[in-house]
Amino acid sequence: MNYWILKSEPDVYSYEDLVKQKIGTWDGVRNYTARNNLKKMEVGDLAFFYHSNIGKEIVGVIKIVKEAFQDPSTEDHRWVAIEVSPLEKLKRPVTLRELKENPAMQHLELVKYTRLSVMSIDKTDFDYILKISQA
DNA sequence: GCCAACGTTGGC
DNA sequence: GCCAACGTTGGC
């Protein structure tokens, strides 16, 4: 079982939008590193939903409900999409700022590779962030 | 709105 | 295959 972080601009597609839809298609990824991560996802994996640009914070936990398939938003066979469902909204969003300020979180890809939209996260870090979101 | 980081493209 | 030019993303 693996853990991930999925980024979206909330004015385009927010966690609340996903809650309304119940199942959302995560498509439109056009970056090989991100695409490779999508391909590694398995049904049942968990991910954080991060709001980029507006908020810049992790707002919820979602789960992968369908593994990689041809991205429906393009004919180009290089790109894939997955499907996700909302699991729970964080009691308190965890901001990028506080992660950057936390010495224990400096190795996070979210902190180091700001432009990557689909990335993995260790279970340890996943649990840690969940924990601080409940404080 | 600006800029840094970084991925992609195309000329050689 | 290298590298300059260019485009895109996302934080500030």
Image: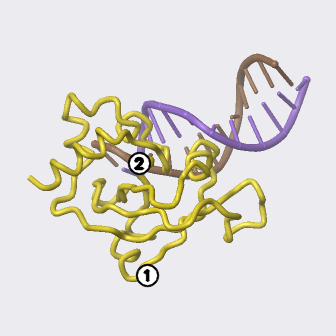
Chain colours: A yellow, B purple, C brown
Image location (x, y in percent) of residue A65: 50, 67
Does dot 2 land on a helix, a strand or a loop? strand
Residue A40 located left or right of residue C10: right
Residue A49 located left or right of residue A98: right
**Residue at the location (44% across, 48% down)?**
A1
Protein chain holding label 2: A
Mark 1 packing: few (<14 Cα in 10 Å), some, or many (20+)?
A: few
Image location (x, y in percent) of residue A72: 68, 71
Does dot 1 land on a helix, a strand or a loop? helix
The foreground one among A28 and A133 is A133
Dividing the picture into quadrants, the one containing residue A46 is: bottom left
Residue A36 located left or right of residue A19: right
Disc 1 marks which residue? A21
N-terminal of the pair, mark 2 or mark 1, is 2
Q: From what the image shows, is residue A32 above or below residue A112?
A: below
**Residue at the location (44% across, 37% down)?**
A113
Q: Residue extending furthest left?
A: A135
Image location (x, y in percent) of residue A49: 37, 59
Q: Amino acid at mark 1?
A: Gln
**Residue at the location (13% across, 56% down)?**
A134
Measured Cα–Cα span from mark 2 to mark 1: 22 Å
Residue A25 located left or right of residue A15: right
Q: Amino acid at mark 2?
A: Tyr
Disc 2 marks which residue? A3
Image location (x, y in percent) of residue A31: 62, 48
Protein chain holding label 1: A
Mark 2 packing: few (<14 Cα in 10 Å), some, or many (20+)?
A: many
